[in-house]
Amino acid sequence: MAMIWVRRSRAIAQSLNYKYGILGVMSQAQEERCHSFQHLHASSSTHSLVSACKYSTTINVSDKRLKSTVALKHLDSTEFASDSDDEQVLDFPGGKVSYTSEMRFISESPEKRIPCYRVLDDSGEIIHGSDVKEVNKKVAVKMYNNMVTLEMMDNIFYEAQRQGRISFYVTSKGEEAISIASAAALSSHDYILPQYREPGVLLWRGFTIQEFANQLFGNRADYGKGRQMPIHYGSNKHNYITISSPIATQLPQAVGVAYSLKMDKKDACVVTFTGDGGTSEGDFHAALNFAAVMDAPVIFICRNNGWAISTNVSEQFRSDGVVVKGQAYGIRSIRVDGNDALAVYSAIHFARKMAINEQRPVLVEALTYRVGHHSTSDDSTKYRPVDEIEYWKSARNPASRFRNWIESNGWWNDTEETELRSSLKKQLLQAVQAAEKTEKPPLADMFSDVYDVPPSNLRAQENQLRETIKKYPQDYPSDVPV
């Protein structure tokens, strides 16, 4: 018994020394981590707070706090000494695991949901004591300008589709803050692998209204030469990888791009977006595991807007949203209010620092709501209450919320609002007219840009198509040059 007591005492002493230092007091860094957790998650239970201070390296929001502790990849078995029936541990690959004779299953869900980080309250006022990255007037006004621009682009281009002038369109209504605020927090050197509700990133980086219109109309000025569906934007100049339709395929690709940046020691990261529906794809899980194992500097941003087309999130997964999935794969994660532009900006700013400085992936779940239909091929009123849509459209509007904040700072007023909207409407209508009048790409572009020297089967296909056009000229679009 004496020997067992001595051995247990030594284990306890080692554990106390690890946690509190030789003198039995917390180090400054540990105090800061615990204080930060209390501040960000004041609503959490005491048990959760203690657990977080023991084991978590929470996302903190000051440069000083960003210096995370050494990752506990190999947990000290003494941490669990009090739960163990003896002093033996399983020296398993990846870290030592203590034994216990108590049968205990891990709970399928925590008692409380992960809290959502926000900075602005519903009326657009700064919440007292918020951890926030300071935004100057120039950046803030540009963010709001871009949100209004995106809102009006959606209105004009959506109507153009309804008039039959373009074939397809997807709006970003209700989600403008996510793409624009995240873009504002990034560097132009960072690569973007988007889904299809991130035109705000391109807008921020200088993609013009005319360039958007050219892509939608698939004319000769379209960088994709009319070979992509509308809204499948891409720009080599802006490090914005062309959108592809299959859901979530961009996620593992983003990890590969990020790992290449890491190998080249670039001062940049990769940011990739997906919706909540994308997390139900296998590519999402493969990407997170790939990123975690390879320590790739990639930020996964999930726009959890509650609906994957007509499928509610409650029918997709039983977990507490998406943020908890990051922890399962060993990825630092945070849940943020996606309708709070200032909170998104702050979270992505510090997530980028972590990704680059610490060479690690980060998962950000942005809670928002898709106010518009999934696309022009959808009628969301068939599966969502109209009152619910109207509530999010008015009471939770991200642009209105952010406008209240910049107005309270004296950076915006009604006159500037009227002038902005009037100017944008003229620009958009002119862009639509110009794009519509611009000639379509020639037929030969359909077969170019894949091979240096086209193979015989591709040449045969082109010849066959040209013969068909000669035979049935009435069925071929007259505005596409042969």
Image: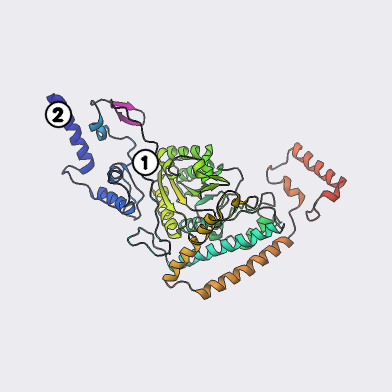
Q: Residue 120, position in %: x, y?
A: 41, 61
Q: Amino acid at mark 2?
A: Val
Q: Nearer the viewer, residue 22 or 431?
A: 431
- Compared across the picture, whether 130 is left or right of 377 comes to left
Q: Are marks 1 and 2 in contact (CB under 8 Å)?
A: no
Disc 1: which residue: 110
Tag in front: 1 or 2? 1
Disc 2: which residue: 6
Q: Amino acid at mark 1?
A: Pro
Q: Which mark is residue 49?
A: none
Judged from the image, the secondary structure of the residue bearing numbered disc 1 is loop
Q: Quadrant of residue 129?
A: bottom left
Q: Residue 117, position in %: x, y?
A: 39, 53
Residue 103 counted in the magenta span? yes
* Above or below, comparing residue 276 to residue 136 in the picture: above
**Stretch in magenta:** 89-109
Q: Please identify the quadrant where the N terminus is shown.
A: top left
The answer to whether residue 84 is seen in the rendering is: yes
> Among all residues in the image, which is located at the extreme left?
2
Residue 363 counted in the magenta span? no
Q: Residue at x 17, y 28 (%)?
A: 7
* Above or below, comparing residue 210 to residue 57 in the picture: below
> Among all residues in the image, which is located at the extreme right?
471
Judged from the image, the secondary structure of the residue bearing numbered disc 2 is helix
Q: Residue 144, position in %: x, y?
A: 50, 65
Q: Magenta span: helix, strand or loop, mainly?
A: loop
Mark 1, other Cα within 10 Å: few <14 / some 14–19 / many ≥20: few
